Amino acid sequence: MKVAEINFLDIEENNEYIDILNKVLEKCFEEENLNSKNLYINIVLTNPQNIKEINKQYRNIDKETDVLSFPMFEKKEIKKLDNKNQDILGDIVISIEKVKEQAVEYEHSFERELAYMAVHGFYHLMGYDHMVENDKKEMREKEENILKKLNILK
């Protein structure tokens, strides 16, 4: 089952990115018991200019960011979804340039940084957030669990 539709917006297509994202999101779906649901995620990989425009248009924030998530469901609605219709869990937009910069800044591999952006975006689509400390802790534990299970640690 295909869990992600991966699109490239104003950047060159790259099979390595596709492989990393598919591996990570398949593990996310497995860990959250979503494989029985008929769901997929739309991922857009783009540049800082586009992500800034999207951030301004949809969040009224006029600046670049690394990842944006646009969920289609509330947290409690996801559990109730059946597998009859194919539904989009939501959209994740990732700035590849920001991923490269942050990999250097945090001394991570590119794979680790891209994987983290995907996992982070996924958990936002699942209704998790990091505005309150308890929620942040829960979200971080879930993110780290995925990366650990995939052995994407550095």
Image: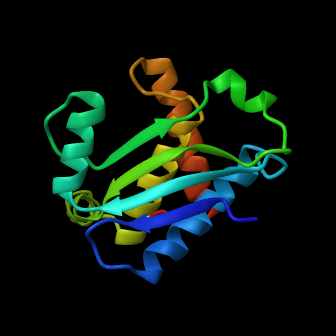
Q: Position of residue 140 (x, y in %)?
A: 50, 38
> In this rendering, is residue 42 above or below 56?
below
> Residue at coordinates 51% horizontally, 22% vertically from top-left?
135
In the image, is residue 133 above or below residue 84? above
Q: Is residue 142 left or right of residue 54?
A: right
Q: Nearer the viewer, residue 125 or 24?
A: 125
Which residue is found at the position 77% from the left and 49% from the top? 38
* Residue 20 makes an appearance in the image: yes
Residue nearer the viewer, 132 or 154: 132
Residue 103 found in image quarter: bottom left
In the image, residue 136 above or below residue 22: above
Q: Percent from the top left, x then y, of residue 13?
A: 37, 79
Residue 54, position as x, y percentages in the image? 27, 43
Q: Is residue 151 visible?
A: no
Quarter occupied by residue 27: bottom right
| Residue shown at the point (56%, 34%) measured from the top left | 72
Lateral position of residue 57 relative to residue 122, left or right: left
